[in-house]
Amino acid sequence: MKTLQFSLLVISICLLSNFYSVGQYSEGKKYLEGSFGIGKVSVKNPTQSDALSSNLNLTYGKFVTKSKARFWTFGFSHSETENGFEYNVKNSQNRFSIGLGNEYYKPIFGNLGIYGRLQGNIYAGNTSKTIKDDVSPSNIEDTDTFSSGITFGGSGGISYFVNKKLALVVPIVSSNLFALDFSQTKNETMISTSRTSMISYSISPTINLNLGIGMRYVF
């Protein structure tokens, strides 16, 4: 709710301040956009759970016309959780992705405009789960999953120029249209070792609310 209120406040300020125009996109303009986040949650309750997460996203784009840009993206995310209720359980996940897409931009008035994106991604990642039980060794288990695939989707939002070099970007909606995934899992216990492979796909043209705020350097 706080994110929604802050986003609405930013949009309102943009609308009220458009009487002074400082910039817009044009053919040949390039931009760099990035975000980084890190968080840790430690809850001291009977489950004794801890969670750590981090993510990095970088985007480089170039406008081939004043209303269309081609962009490339790189993303990385990492998460860890630990639970020690009955026995110790650790989960970790790493994921890399690269993407290519087109951005379509429409100025509204002054410094304000709207944009829409169509983007394809290739990703690869690893997920691991470890169960340790000092009381019952038969509960010890290690699961490791490698996954990769491609996704295709879209997103849209608002772009507002703070000055000629900096633009405020407010994503509003996103959609995952298609995904093709491959995964290979290895499971080890005190008794046996097994391996499984799976290929799956999904076609789900749904639209999700995805509010956020980012900065873009234009040059």
Image: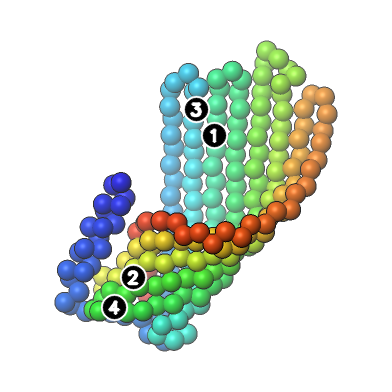
Q: CA distance from mark 2 to mark 4?
A: 10 Å
Q: Residue furthest top?
A: 135
Q: Which residue is mark 2?
A: 159
| Callout 3 touching callout 1 (CB < 8 Å) | yes
Whether 90 is drawn above or below 123: the answer is above
Q: From this viewpoint, is residue 60 visible?
A: no
Q: Who comes first in sequence, dot 3 or dot 4?
A: 3
Q: Who comes first in sequence, dot 3 or dot 1?
A: 3
Left or right: 185 in relation to 131: right
Q: Amino acid at mark 1?
A: Thr
Q: Who comes first in sequence, dot 1 or dot 2?
A: 1
* Viewer-side residue, 188 vs 7: 7
| Callout 2 touching callout 4 (CB < 8 Å) | no
Left or right: 115 in relation to 142: left
Q: Check disc 1 and report its element: helix, strand or loop.
A: strand
| Callout 2 touching callout 3 (CB < 8 Å) | no
Task: Name the spot of residue 55 as percent of width and height, x first.
Answer: 49, 51
Q: Check disc 3 and report its element: helix, strand or loop.
A: strand
Q: CA distance from mark 1 to mark 4?
A: 45 Å
* Viewer-side residue, 130 vs 103: 103
Whether 118 is drawn above or below 29: the answer is above
Q: Who comes first in sequence, dot 1 or dot 4?
A: 1
x 61%, y 27%: residue = 89
Q: Which residue is mark 3?
A: 49
Q: Amino acid at mark 2?
A: Ser
Q: CA distance from mark 3 to mark 1?
A: 7 Å
Q: Which residue is mark 4?
A: 108
Q: CA distance from mark 3 to mark 4?
A: 48 Å
